[in-house]
Amino acid sequence: MEILHDVTFNIQITKHTFCNYQLKIDDKVMSLTFPQLLQLRNKVQALTSLDSLENIIQNENFVLLFIADRKHLVFLDIPKLIDLKEELGYCFSEF
Amino acid sequence: MKTAIRRQMTIHPEVMDVLNDQIALEMHASASYLAMASWCDQRELLNSKAFFYKQAEEEREHGMKIFNFINDAGGAAISPAIPVVNNDFESLKAIYETSLDQEIGVTQSIYKCFSKARSVNDFASEVFLQWFVNEQVEEEDTVRSILDVFELMGDMPLKMIDERLPTE
């Protein structure tokens, strides 16, 4: 666990204030309210269903995702999309 | 992050997901009943049309009840997309049989939600879902009673059967 202190993840969600979260994707840092975080979780779950992933791979092979009530637009390739799903899963697993 | 999400919402995220699926199912059932009501309405089957219009309303109310619960519990209710609804039926009896199958499907899905709530110790959702468990027993029984009438009056004209169907 000590080693993890020096590791920086490409995608990270951190709690900023009581109802404010920060999502970092590479160098981009976005501030999200809790409803916006729930919305993102819902979008990412829909995008990472088996059918949807297959559809993305067979077409553009990336997704453009609006985040935080369309304040931000991010480009995600498949590995990044799956990383984001995992990070959200981790965030909500601590219920 | 420990407890951060819990401070924002009472409902467990996994229960929220299955309840959102349940909303979609209830709304689809409502749309499906509307199609059945229209079929009966066009054929002047007055009791059946009233029954299915009422069912359509009830299913929507069920969906809305879950919708409000999710939002009240700090989650995010999702307005569902309604997939294709069948408007083509072969007989009144077939409609009621479809209706029973649909109710059984809804019951099974409620059980799935209940079971999920229990498995993650989301007691608030479990108690909320108890009403639906009881309601589904009633719903299934109502349709079964109607199908019994069809069994008893199998050879009678359609309009005559419709007139003898229970209206409440």
Image (cartoon, grey):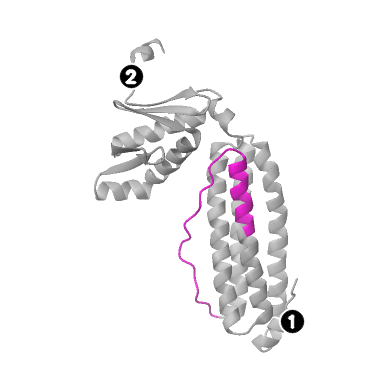
Where does residue B100 sit, x and y in percent of width and height?
A: 63, 67
Q: Are marks 2 and 1 in contact (CB under 8 Å)?
A: no
- Identify the magenta region: B61-90
Badge 1 marks a residue whose secondary structure is loop
Quadrant of res B15: top right
Quarter of the picture containing the N terminus of chain A is top left
Dominant SS in magenta: loop
Tell me residue B139's x, y (percent).
69, 62
**Disc 1 crowd, CA 10 A, few/some/many (<14, 14-19, 20+):** few
Spot occupied by residue B57 in the image (x, y as percentages of width and height): 63, 64
Q: Which of marks 2 and 1 is in front?
A: 2
Tag 1, which chain?
B
The quadrant of the image that shows the C terminus of chain A is top right
Q: How crowded is mark 2: few (under 14 residues within 10 Å), some or many (20 or more)?
A: few
Please give the residue where the numbered disc 2 appears in the rendered image: A8
- The outermost residue toward the front is A71
Q: Is A91 placed left or right of A51 in the picture?
A: right
Which amino acid lies under the numbered mark 2 shown in the image of this protein? Answer: Thr
Instruction: Report x, y in % for residue B10.
Output: 61, 35
Tag 1: amino acid: Arg
Q: Is the residue B35 above or below the residue B121 in the image? A: below
| The disc label shown at residue B101, or none | none
x 62%, y 73%: residue: B96
User: Is B33 within the magenta?
Assistant: no
Name the chain under label 2: A
Q: Does the magenta stretch include residue B66?
A: yes
Position above or below: A13 against B102: above
Q: Distance between the residues labelled 2 and 1?
A: 72 Å
Residue at x 69%, y 52% (from the top left corner): B133
Quickly name the residue at label 1. Answer: B164
